Image (spheres, rainbow, N blue to C red):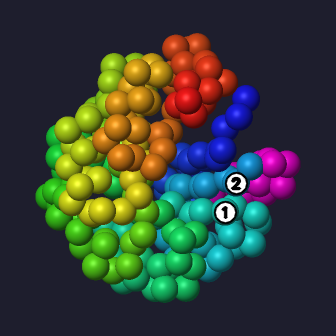
Amino acid sequence: MGASRLHVVDLDAAASGESENREIIRNIASVMLIPTQLGGGMRDIETIQKMLTLGIERVILGTVAVENPRLVEEACKRFNDYIIVSIDSRDGFVATRGWVQETKLTTIKFAQQMVNLGARRFIYTDIVRDGTLTEPNFSSISELVHSTKLPVIAAGGVTSILHLKMLKQLGVEGAIIGKALYTGDINLKEAIAELNR
């Protein structure tokens, strides 16, 4: 349908740190004709290396970025643009471990810390809006784009082509669409054609 990238999250690994889905991930990466990015359970350099070797184009670091920032620094040095730092935010604060653990880190402060460690790209997910078919948190996304001056991929609440146009105007690099594809609220082919006009 024209997607330029596939976004996959291993939810089992995100919660436990252990992946039981490695074979599925390998199969997805091997059959896709577009780049695949993967998040969930990336807790060490060896796992990141394995996923990149399987054919994953970008690896997403979330929980580990909060719990072990030095790993992010090392990963960014070794793998450069193949690393994305994921910021899962609830009411302005970062959450970890599959969104079940709260932190006292604000989204912007955490993002700036990651920039200082070498992060080159972010995924921002508003947990409160994710899967709700409401709308993205435009103000928080705009603040992140302007404070980091780095590519930001927005997620959470994207429900219409209008939302995608608004995100584009805010300067985001891309948007992750999940539930709205399953429900038919967004026709991917139409959305891509509209955004490319």
Relative to 46, 83 lies left or right: left
Is the Cβ of the residue at disc 2 closer than 8 Å to that at disc 1? yes
Q: Tell me which amino acid carries mark 1.
A: Glu
Estimate the x, y position of residue 28 in percent, counting from the top left.
77, 48
**Prevailing secondary structure of the magenta residues:** helix
**Residue depicted at x 20% and y 49%:** 143
* Residue drawn at point x = 76 percent, y = 66 percent: 54
25 up-or-down from 68: above or below = above
- Dot 2 falls on a residue whose secondary structure is loop
Q: Is residue 173 visible?
A: yes
Taking the view exactly as shown, the residue that stands out farthest to the front is 197
| Whether residue 10 is situated above or below residue 48 in the rendered picture | above
Label 2 belongs to which residue?
A: 35
Label 2 vs 1, first from the N-terminus: 2
Q: Is residue 27 one of those drawn in magenta?
A: yes
What amino acid type is highlighted by mark number 2? Answer: Pro
Outermost residue toward the right? 31
Q: Quadrant of the N terminus?
A: top right
The image quadrant where one finds the C terminus is top right
Residue 138: image quadrant is: top left
Residue 191 at what x, y percent from top left?
Answer: 57, 24
In what element is the residue under mark 1? loop
In the rendered structure, the answer to whether residue 152 lies left or right of residue 128 reads right
Q: Position of residue 149 (x, y in %)?
A: 30, 62
Mark 1 lies on residue: 57
Q: Is residue 12 magenta?
A: no
- Residue nearest the observer in this picture, 197 or 10: 197
Tell me where the magenta segment starts and ends, as one range. 19-33
Residue 120 pos. (x, y %) = 42, 69
Residue 109 in which image quadrant: bottom left
- Residue 105: assigned label: none
